[in-house]
Image: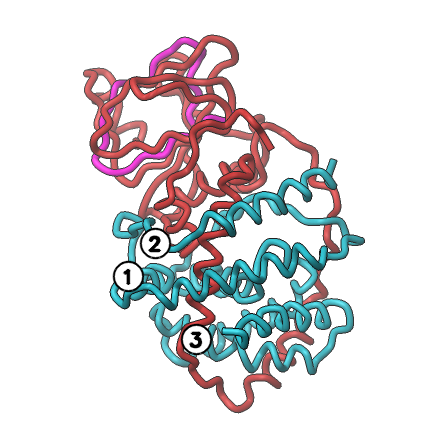
Chain colours: A cyan, B red
Amino acid sequence: MNQRQTSDARWVRLVERVRSDKDQAAFAELFAHFAPRVKAFLMKSGADSSLAEECAQEVMATVWHKAQLFDPERASVATWVFTIARNRRIDALRKQRRPEPEDLTWGPEHEPDQSETIALQQESELLGRALAALPENQRVLIERAYFGELSHSEIAAETGLPLGTIKSRIRLALERLRQEMQ
Amino acid sequence: MSTTITHHLTDALLMSYAAGNLPEAFSLVVATHISMCDECRARLASFEAVGGAVLEDAPECAMSEDSFAATMRLIAGMPAEARIEAAPETRGLFPKPLRDYVGGDVDAVQWRSLGGKLRQAVLPTARDASVRLLYIPAGAAMPDHGHAGMELTMVLQGAFHDEDGYYGPGDVEVANEDLKHTPVAAPGPDCICLVATDAPLKFSGLLPRIAQPFIGI
């Protein structure tokens, strides 16, 4: 599991290089890891191979363009990429608009806090491990929900995952953000 | 932001919204509430983190050979991302997602009378559920109604109370088949609510039932 631990922090550094240096080599590494997963995610959600390929490319292009909006104190790179892929799916497959909450962003001068970033990435890793450790049928149900196979009335929000700790950490990050905005 | 919100979104709603499975009309209520409620914003982020873990564990599906070069061409053809705006636009009554659907703040709403001083404005969304703004004068009652499906009611101004409790600005009531209620607007400022439903409301009073085909609830 140490491998996963090192990789989550590594994705954060790669996104930072894309953001600050328009670093194509860093982007290529992100692409090699995430594009095939996004494509699989979209196919599981009902897209055919060519639509999934097209959308996965668009999702990765969005990763490049919105790199400065990624906040490592509130999300892992995988979580951020998931939200971009999900929104692309709603637009391309369900053909619906997606109302989004008002953005909360740090000012342009903000540098992510290293210790907060590391702590959040560690929480994400723990969550990933907890998901992998769930009984098969429970894990499959969660995956089906996130692949868009379950309607809201079919979703059982009781995931069996320990979400309280990551929630508390994100809540504190929001409080710091609100204080800076004042 | 507000410290007075006491009625929050359910886990099921937040998880459906995180997974991207909620009808657009419900999503608008969720996005509007989260704009005002950091507690639910953090809960949503934790459900999105589950999505990140699912994506991370997803099987890989090989991209086409040319895909990286094609993506770089896509990037080159996109307009440069607008700079991050430090300050949000001037605050009005409605959070941004709602303003996007209304086409402005409360003064831009195109109200239609429901009889008396009761008014509504249906907002355009996909048809799997519907969402409307309701204007209930202080002290007035909403028609007594039950539900065939789920109904979300979020207060934007004023307050209402019903058999289940007291709801002020930012609060959301989640009602289903079991709840048959008569919301009454509290004294003070007139009550403005955002209401989403995935089934027609069933009114028990005679007059609202007659009016129902015309008002589109």
Within 10 Å of the Cα at label 3, are there few (<14), some (14-19), or many (20+) other Cα atoms? many
> On what subunit does the disc labeled 3 rest?
A
Whether B14 is drawn above or below B208: the answer is below
Chain assignment, label 1:
A
Q: Secondary structure at mark 2?
A: loop
Q: Is residue A24 visible?
A: yes
Q: Amino acid at mark 2?
A: Thr
Range shown magenta: B134-156
Residue A74 included in the magenta stretch of the image = no
Q: Let me know if residue A70 appears in the view.
A: no
Disc 2 marks which residue?
A159
| Residue A135 position in % (x across, y down) | 28, 65
What's the residue type where badge 3 is placed? Ala
Indicate the amino acid at tag 1: Gln
Indicate the chain on which mark 2 is placed. Answer: A
Task: Give the CA separation, mark 3 to mark 1.
Answer: 26 Å
Residue under the image location 28 percent in, 61 percent down? A138
Quadrant of image for the C terminus of chain A: top right
- Seen as rendered, the residue at the extreme right is A109
- Could you tell me if the residues under marks 2 and 1 are in contact, i.e. CB atoms within 8 Å? yes
Q: Position of residue A91 (x, y in %)?
A: 45, 60
Give a yes or no on whether discs 3 and 2 share a subunit: yes
- Residue B150 colored magenta? yes
- Residue A154 % position (x, y): 26, 52
The label on residue A138 is 1
Mark sitting earlier along the chain (3/2): 3
Residue A52 marker: 3
A117 lies left or right of A84: right
Q: Secondary structure at mark 1?
A: helix
Question: Which residue is at 60% across, 76% downward?
Answer: A30
